[in-house]
Image: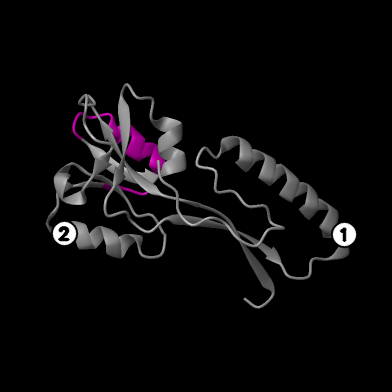
């Protein structure tokens, strides 16, 4: 929409989260072909290129994988030994404790998740103060809760692309 201003807030990678025991000495880098597609707990992340990347590595038509639209259900189902799922790093960071769940990078990596802030190009004068307060609170929250460090404030113009665990 021409009246909407889109500002990129942050970029984060997708990672694999697995349940079970972490094998000592095992690399933190997985190739998609090393994962059993029937053990996947799938969430359809709505990021440009993600579904195409996923379908390039696994045949979704011939899989017995579990599919959900909720990250909370994905985490619950990942509690079963051998199950795995792909999720944005921020969620994996929140849920992976290094005891029950482990996270791994993928190679090749899926396209990153990009989050945007949408605002009206010409906000009404009565809304400007509220928007400024919202921006300040949002930036403080993201700075505190973003371990991958790709935050940009709404006043900046660029965000580093991608990040590595």
Position of residue 11 measured from the top left corner of the image (x, y, whole percent): 50, 53
Is label 1 or label 2 in front? 2
SS under mark 1: helix
Total numbered badges shown on the rendered structure: 2
Seen at 77% across and 54% down, the residue is 131
Task: Answer few, some or many: residues within 10 Å of disc 2's Cα (few below 14, many 20 plus, some between 14 and 19).
Answer: few
**First in sequence: mark 1 or mark 2?**
2
Q: Which residue is mark 1?
A: 126
Q: Is residue 46 left or right of residue 54?
A: right
In this picture, which residue range is highlighted in magenta?
67-82
Residue 143: image quadrant is: top right
Above-or-below relation of 39 to 132: above
Task: Answer few, some or many: residues within 10 Å of disc 1's Cα (few below 14, many 20 plus, some between 14 and 19).
Answer: few
Q: Is residue 151 left or right of residue 133?
A: left
Position of residue 106 measured from the top left corner of the image (x, y, whole percent): 28, 48
Q: Is residue 78 left or right of residue 140?
A: left
Which numbered marker is on residue 59?
2
Which numbered marker is on residue 7?
none
């Amino acid at each position: 929409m021409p009246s909407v201003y889109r500002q990129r807030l942050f970029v984060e990678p997708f990672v694999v989260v697995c349940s079970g025991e972490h094998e000592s000495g095992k690399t933190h880098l997985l190739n998609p072909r090393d994962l059993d597609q029937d053990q996947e707990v799938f969430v359809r992340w709505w990021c440009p290129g993600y579904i195409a990347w996923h379908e390039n590595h696994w045949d979704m038509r011939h899989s017995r994988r579990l599919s959900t639209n909720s990250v909370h259900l994905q985490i619950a189902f990942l509690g079963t030994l051998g199950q795995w799922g792909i999720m944005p790093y921020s969620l994996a960071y929140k849920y992976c404790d290094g005891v029950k769940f482990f996270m791994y990078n993928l190679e090749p990596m899926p396209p990153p998740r990009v989050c945007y802030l949408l605002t009206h190009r010409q906000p009404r004068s009565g809304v400007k103060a509220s928007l400024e307060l919202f921006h300040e609170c949002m930036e403080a929250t993201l700075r505190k809760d973003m371990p991958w460090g790709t935050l940009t404030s709404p006043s900046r113009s660029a965000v580093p692309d991608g990040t590595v665990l």
